[in-house]
Structure formats: structure tokens, C-alpha cells
Amino acid sequence: MRVLVVEDDAKLAALIRRGLDSYGMSADVAGTGDQALELAGATAYDVVLLDVMLPGLDGLQVCARLREEGNAAPVLMLTALDGVLDKVAGLDSGADDYLAKPFAFAELLARIRALTRRATPWREPLLRVGDLVLDPAARTVRRGEVDIAVTVKEFAILQALMRRAGQACTRVELLDSAWDMTYDNRSNIVDVYVHDLREKIDRPFGTSTVQTVRGVGYRLAVGP
């Protein structure tokens, strides 16, 4: 899925972009209305996240222009203005939904899914590293043509490693991916689960994709 993030707050735009990337979406960022129109005219986006308060052309004007130009991509307005009249103005300009700031990323993600489902059902893309394939939607793992049974925690850890393949993941990051915030992160439970993962996805196939990064945590190798 490709998303256009139109937001003049560089820090917020970067946070949204990283969050979308972690869920397998590709995001482009525009800091002005003019830049947004230029990008939207050159690329087919599945959804547009559009801040109302922009320098130059504001979000309402950008949305209206998109519709005038025949761009039917779903538009989710993002703004600190959450009064009824503000929402009406946004929807009247051609927006499909409206989300007031500040917002939780989980809600933003849910709104994106809802908007894209109206056109085409969205399925989170497969994660592939070599012949290792993880399907987030079906919750399955396979290497080559061999299905591999993993536990819920093993799946969460493997998914975190595959999303950042080639990069080191700390034990705390892997804990956060599979356990809630109340879990004692001084425990060696991650090491136990990584050992079990290796026994399932590496050892039977003569591979060693899950590598230890001394003093840090673990990394999923992307090459031989």
C-alpha cells in the first residue's frame, strides 16, 4: 500500500512515516499543499493523509483540487481543529474521513484500513527474507515449501526480526513486540524463545539466519 502523508510538522511526518513503514506500507511525505498536488499528480496513492493547516494552500484547498482533477484516492484529514463546522468543511471539500490531533497511531492505522477496505480489501504484505516467508494475515511461516509451526510469541519475535532484516534488534525491542509493558525486561525469556526459533527455522534446514549481535540482541541475516 502506498500512502501520501501531507504534514508540515517534520517530526510528526517522520513518526507517521516510520509507523506506516513498520506495517509494510510505503509512504511519501509532502510538507506543503503544492508539493502534495505535485506528488499526487505523478503517483497513484491508495490513501492520502492530509493535514488541514498547511503553509500556502491549506488542506481543504488541496483536497478540493484533488477532486477537481479527478483524483479519487481516499483522503483522511488530520487536524487540531475538531469542531463540527471544521469537520463539515473537511468533508465538503471531498475528504472521506476526519481524525483530530493528537491521535493514537493505532486509530490512524484503523482509519486507513477502513478507508482502503471500501475500495479493495487490504492484506498486509508477506515478509520475505531469502526462502523464509511470514504471512502476517494468515499467521503462518514457511521456509521454501515447508510449513513451520511456531507459537504466538515466536511468531511475534520472528515478525519483528523480519521487518528489520539485516538490522540489529535489541532484546527490549523484541520483548516489546511480543509481551506487554508490564513484563520484566530483565528476564532472559527472549533468549529462550530465540533458541526455540532457531531450532525450528534454521537447524532443520542447515541455515543460521538468526544471528546473535553481542551486547545488543539479535539480527536476521539477509544474505548467505
Image (cartoon, rainbow, N blue to C red):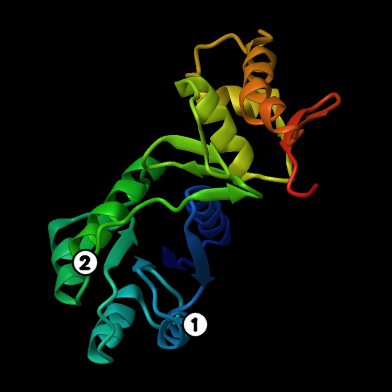
First reached walking from the N terminus: tag 2 or tag 1? 1
Q: Answer above or below: position of 19 versus 57.
A: above
Q: Answer above or below: position of 191 versus 46.
A: above
Residue on which the image places disc 2: 119
Residue 104 shows which numbered tag?
Answer: none
Secondary structure of residue under mark 2: helix
Where is residue 17? Give x, y as percent.
52, 57
| Quarter residue 64 falls in | bottom left
| Quarter residue 97 falls in | bottom left
> In the rendered image, which quarter contains the N terminus?
bottom left
Q: How many other residues sit within 10 Å of disc 1, few (<14), some (14-19) or many (≥20)?
A: some
Where is residue 89? Give x, y as percent.
17, 71
Q: Answer above or below: position of 70 versus 206.
A: below
Task: Please tell me how many numbered marks the rendered image carries.
Answer: 2
| Amino acid found under the numbered disc labelled 2 | Ala
Does residue 155 appear in this view?
A: yes
Between 195 and 186, the one nearer to me in the picture: 195
Residue on which the image places disc 1: 35
